[in-house]
Image (spheres, rainbow, N blue to C red):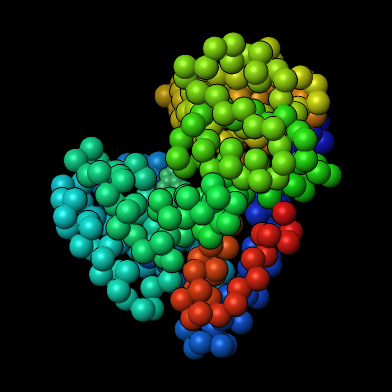
């Protein structure tokens, strides 16, 4: 029988956070006579993006947040998309705007991110929010790293002085994660595809974050017995046991690493639910900001 003691249960952390968010969205409704609102733009037919967007919308609806789903065909031009974003920026009753990534190749991700009003940027990807995070004065923080930090702060008594190693330097996870951990007084190593002696770096980690998008790349030879491992990867691979079926795996070889380390997030059921819960948090925050109302960041005191 599987011993679940080492698992970091992302679903249960997400539910804990959503329980705090629910009354805030209710209170918002009573104060301002409307629900906080989130516009989600999905371009094209990518099946994984479709599932992520559905989950985001379902969670929003369940938490008193109005969601506006805008589905656009793959052929949508960059100009059309930017015009849509500009009109959402101007709509006073839209609090948060999210454009699901990745985008079709003919659309510049950076142009899209730059066009979203930083005060509606619930993904925290806009250069203004990115810069504020790096300066230690965060406004909107990207949801996945924020969720990882929340779990780490709850799992560890303190983060100060810990060796944190991040594998992957994306703008969505690796870089903001590095900044958050640095602000929590960790010693941060941000590794990537050109890093020499990757295994040796990872082996020294008290906290190991994998966000590379390589199925089960990190095995038991990369970790030490005291490590807390956070697996951000979501990779769909063929299921070896069931012909023609697929399954989800992370960037960590869970079966091998589980036996060695202190704690680990599973895939699915680890980081994924926390990303969505943090999106709800950022949307409520954007809604209160929209009304120029003082919002006490619930992630700041509980993380
Ligand atoms: N695609 C993968 N992760 C994310 C995310 O956090 N936000 C957006 N907008 N797109 C994504």
Q: Nearer the viewer, residue 203 or 53?
A: 203
211 in relation to 200, above or below: below
Q: Which residue: 16% across, 47% down?
A: 75
Front residue of 53/213: it is: 213
Residue reaching furthest to the front: 135
Residue 56: x and y, percent? 48, 57
Residue 235 pos. (x, y %): 48, 30
Vertical position of residue 178 compared to residue 246: above or below: below
Report the quarter where the N terminus lies: top right
From the viewer's side, name the closer residue of 186 and 199. Answer: 186
Q: In which quarter of the image is residue 284?
A: bottom right
Image x and y of residue 301, in percent: 73, 61
**Position in image of residue 174 (x %, y %):** 53, 36
Apparent side of residue 186 relative to residue 234 in the rendered image (left or right): right
Q: Residue at x 43, y 55 (%)?
A: 128
Q: Quadrant of residue 99?
A: bottom left
* Residue 243 seen in the current view: yes
Q: In this view, does 230 lie above or below 124?
A: above
Judge left or right: residue 290 versus residue 112: right
Residue located 80% across and 29% down the image: 262
């Amino acid at each position: 029988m599987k011993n679940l003691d080492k698992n970091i249960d992302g679903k249960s952390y997400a539910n804990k956070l959503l329980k705090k968010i629910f009354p805030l969205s209710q209170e918002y409704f009573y104060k301002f006579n409307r629900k906080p609102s989130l516009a989600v733009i999905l371009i094209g037919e990518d099946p994984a993006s479709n599932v992520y967007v559905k989950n985001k919308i379902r969670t929003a609806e369940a938490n008193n947040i109005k969601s506006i789903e805008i589905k656009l065909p793959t052929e949508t031009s960059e100009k059309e998309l930017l015009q849509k974003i500009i009109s959402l920026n101007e709509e006073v009753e839209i609090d948060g705007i999210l454009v699901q990534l990745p985008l079709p190749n003919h659309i510049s991700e950076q142009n899209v991110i730059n066009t979203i009003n930083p005060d509606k940027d619930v993904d925290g990807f806009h250069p203004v929010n990115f810069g504020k995070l790096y300066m230690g004065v965060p406004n909107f923080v990207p949801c996945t790293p924020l969720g990882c930090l929340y779990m780490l702060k709850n799992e560890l008594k303190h983060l100060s002085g810990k060796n944190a190693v991040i594998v992957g330097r994306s703008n969505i996870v690796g870089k903001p994660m590095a900044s958050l951990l640095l602000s929590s007084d960790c010693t941060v190593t941000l590794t990537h595809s050109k890093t020499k002696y990757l295994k040796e770096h990872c082996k020294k980690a008290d906290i190991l974050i994998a966000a590379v998008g390589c199925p089960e790349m990190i095995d038991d030879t990369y970790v030490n017995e005291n490590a807390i491992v956070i697996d951000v990867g979501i990779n769909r691979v063929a299921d070896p046991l069931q012909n023609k079926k697929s399954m989800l795996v992370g960037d960590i070889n869970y079966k091998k690493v589980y036996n060695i380390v202190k704690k680990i997030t599973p895939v699915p059921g680890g980081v994924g639910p926390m990303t969505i819960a943090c999106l709800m948090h950022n949307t409520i925050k954007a809604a209160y900001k929209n009304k120029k109302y003082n919002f006490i960041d619930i992630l700041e005191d509980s993380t």
